């Protein structure tokens, strides 16, 4: 499996190669536009996909709800439909 540093180094290498190929090209041609699109995609990949704070808050709220229900069920019996409410609550 690739490590994060290897992936970033590979992306940097591809970006540099593409920039070298783009330099002698005539601007405003279809080939140049396609290269610019590829360059934008490479930069997006290099930036990486981070999980937003909203998604993390939703995950934390769902986990907290599940933990609360499980702890309550340990002390008191809850109908099996209680876990169906976790998604509706959060």
Image (cartoon, helix red, strand yellow):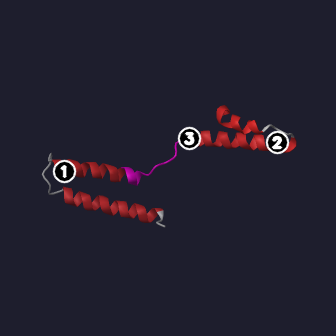
**Mark 3, residue position:** 55
> Badge 3: how crowded within 10 Å, few (<14), some, or many (20+)?
few
> Badge 1: how crowded within 10 Å, few (<14), some, or many (20+)?
some
Please tell me in which quadrant of the rendered image residue 7 appears: bottom left
**Mark 1, residue position:** 32
Q: Which residue is drawn at 85% across and 39% down?
A: 77
Left or right of residue 34, residue 5 in this image: right
Q: Residue 21 carries which label?
A: none
User: For numbered disc 1, what is the local secondary structure?
Assistant: helix
Please tell me in which quadrant of the rendered image residue 13 appears: bottom left
Which comes sooner in the sequence, label 2 or label 3? 3
User: For numbered disc 3, what is the local secondary structure?
Assistant: helix
Left or right of residue 34, residue 56 in this image: right
> Where's residue 74, x and y in %?
84, 45
Q: Residue at x 25, y 49 (%)?
A: 36
**Mark 2, residue position:** 73
């Amino acid at each position: 499996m690739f490590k994060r540093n290897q992936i970033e180094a590979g992306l940097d290498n591809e970006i540099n190669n593409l920039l070298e190929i783009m330099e002698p090209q005539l601007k405003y041609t279809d080939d140049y536009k396609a290269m610019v699109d590829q360059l934008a995609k490479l930069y997006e990949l290099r930036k990486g996909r981070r999980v937003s704070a909203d998604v993390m808050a939703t995950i934390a709220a769902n986990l907290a709800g599940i933990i609360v229900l499980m702890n309550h069920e340990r002390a008191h019996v809850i109908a099996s439909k209680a876990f169906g409410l976790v998604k509706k609550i959060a």
